[in-house]
Amino acid sequence: YREGLDLYAKKDYPAALREFQHAAFGKEDSSYWYCCGLCQYALKKYESALSDFDYACFFNPSNTDARIMRGYTYFLLEDYAGAVEELEEALRQKPSAKEKVQATLDGARKKLVPGGPRRLRGHFGSVDMLAFSRDGRTLRSKGIEDTVLATWDLESGKMSASSRDVLVALSRDGSMYVSLMKLKDAMSGREIRSLEAGWTGREYDHRPSTMAFSPDGRF
């Protein structure tokens, strides 16, 4: 980690990034992920930088510097709503940062387009399952790293509910999912029925890692 800081000071960002990634691997240390994000940002790899700043904020929501950098990154990715949200939260956490962030915050506010595209913010890391409700008003998503099953209100763009579970399949309309051979209601997490009785692989003492619903959700 210390060597990474020295390399970063010398603007050797690729080498510094390798050191920080080695230090951060397997650790829930916000400062390590923040430094990874700084290197990615300096290398103009903004999506990767955003992911690292996400980790930094997840492991320490009070890391105001990571939140500010996440706001700057959103701005460069033209997610002006995200930039406004992050920088306003950073100012609530640290009012003394106003001089540092005000110009970017004002710029993001000017570029906001009512009804324009928005980034759904709430997961950290990647998402591997998505499903729209039948009425098109909500979206469900499942994160890989955070294992969160999130429900989004699409009108507001806000996460309306979240839970953690081990998902292997999500129904097409997002109303049900399969976890550990149990069919569950996606909103409540309530078990609907067990699928163990029909599983012929029990003698191998393992469960399938991938499953799929039929298009009509009946199978």
Image (cartoon, rainbow, N blue to C red):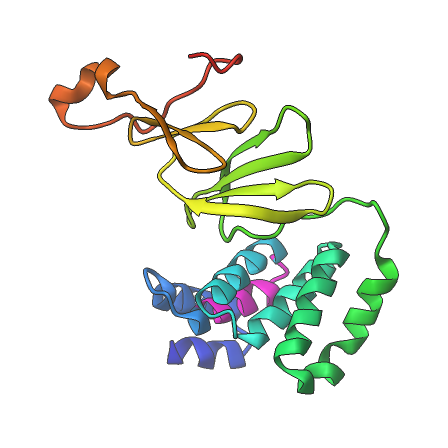
Residue 134, image x, y percentages = 63, 23
Report x, y in % for residue 27: 34, 64
Residue 129 lies, in percent from the top left, at 50, 34
At 43% across and 75% down in the image, what residue appears? 4
Instruction: Magenta stretch: give its range.
Output: 33-45
Quarter of the image that includes the N terminus: bottom left
Q: Nearer the viewer, residue 71 or 140?
A: 140
Vertical comparison of 153 with 92: above or below: above
User: Magenta region's main secondary structure?
Assistant: helix
Locate residue 116 relative to residue 60 in the image: left or right.
right
Q: Nearer the viewer, residue 48 or 213?
A: 213
Res 38 → quadrant: bottom right
- Determine the residue located farthest toward the left in the rendered image: 203
User: Percent x, y for residue 164?
Assistant: 40, 46
Q: Residue furthest bottom?
A: 96
124 falls in the magenta region: no
Write the residue at 57% across / 60% down.
49
**Quadrant of residue 115 in the image?**
top right
* 147 is higher (above) or lower (below) than 191: below
Residue drawn at point x = 63 percent, y = 82 percent: 94
